[in-house]
Amino acid sequence: MHSNGLFLKDVAGFLGFYYTALALMNAVAALILWQKKKQTGWAIAWSVFASVMMVLAGLALSGSKSLVPSLPLAARSLVNTLSGPMLYTLGTTALFTILFVFRKFFVQPMVAWTVFNAALVLMGLSMADENFAAIVMKPDNVPIVGLVFLLAFFTWVATKQAVVNDERIARGLPPMEKLDDEKVLVWPDLVYTELICMVAVSAFLLVWAIFLPAPLEEPASSVKTPNPSKAPWYFLGLQEMLVYFDPWYAGVVLPSLVVFGLMAMPYLDFNKKGNGYYSIEERKFSYLVYQFGFFELWITLIILGTFLRGPNWNFYGPFEYWTPYKVEVLNNVDLPQMFWVNLLDRPLPRAPQGAGTLAQIGYILLREAPGIALVGAYLLLLPPLLAVTFFRGFFAKMGFIRYMIMANLMLLMLSLPLKMILRWTLNLKYLVSIPEFSLNF
């Protein structure tokens, strides 16, 4: 970790270019709004914003510690305090809910453009912090930052199209996709377009590799491993799941269930609406389940593993220094320990010395009875209860077999955030722990 003066000298040029790019981007947007859209008010607003960005660019290029724009220390400390895993998960869930409920507001172009610029400005102000920049500007993490913005953009495009279609369907009009459903020839239309995209992406990657070369680390050594040792970004969600579940479950069972669930979707789905066009209102349940599974149980875990997991796999705030000497006291216990020892003040049931195999299995089942009962009620009793309450319509349309497959897949998906919350709040390690057979859940 170098001194703040040297850091500002290194990052000043980048921030100057960054704010200049923001200024030019918004100047072009203002010009388009003025000449083509005839929205004079918005054009003036974004022209002023572009001017402010040019001022920030000049301050950043000065390299002075007192002039380089940055987030106040109090704001950075607050963000670090609020970046714990529990608040992070609750915050992302609340954000997902707000964006869904008020989607008609957020899909408006000017609203989305404002949110996009606010996010870029916030990132620029955060980059003046040495610890934040060390994480975000790491060559391995730069593509992930770009992918986050690309994911937000394409999600906005799809949601906007769905909102437009839902409004048209409500007025008795066909969706937008039905207005232009001409068949397009694979050759030359599709192949020609793909060829142009391939050439453009190849040129972009070439320029990227010149200005941001891939980091080459020292040869692998069994006596010295990186700290933290992280999987590629697309496996970070899986690596995060390994923290809360046994490897056989997080590494084999859950991924297999994801593949099986995706394969089973066409056979479980009874809603014929929404095929071939974007819609949310006509497929609200399917949309919410998929979006929750994709964003909350995969994308947020990738972001968490990339930017908030540091040395020793501890949690760190975005503006916190990643020191390998940070020690977090954890006393994770299994549910049998919590039930028999902590609650009933009794020792764990154990088979007497010399007991037979059947007797040992009986004592194991007795020891794990609380966890087995809880998991059994969750997977066996909850689906029928939901069938006669919240999911009564689903049960009537799907039938018993399809409904039970759908309900159990959904409950297994929800087991991930529930287990994470139990770990963070109660330090619960496993609900069922049978080390004798290497079976933990």
Image (cartoon, rainbow, N blue to C red):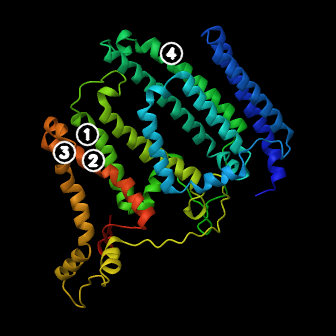
Does dot 1 land on a helix, a strand or a loop?
helix
Q: Residues within 10 Å of mark 2 (few under 14, many from 20)?
A: some
From the viewer's perspective, is residue 32 above or below residue 383? above
Q: What x and y, as percent, mark residue 366?
A: 22, 76
- Residue 389 bears which disc, if any? 3
Q: Which residue is mark 1?
A: 264
Pointer 2 or 4: first along the chain: 4
Does dot 3 land on a helix, a strand or a loop?
loop
Q: Nearer the viewer, mark 1 or mark 4?
A: 1
Pointer 4 or 3: first along the chain: 4
- Residue 192 bears which disc, if any? 4
Instruction: Indicate the amino acid at tag 3.
Output: Thr
Instruction: Indicate the amino acid at tag 4.
Output: Tyr
Give the CA separation, mark 4 to mark 3.
Answer: 53 Å
Q: Which residue is mark 2?
A: 409
Give the CA separation, mark 1 to mark 4.
Answer: 34 Å
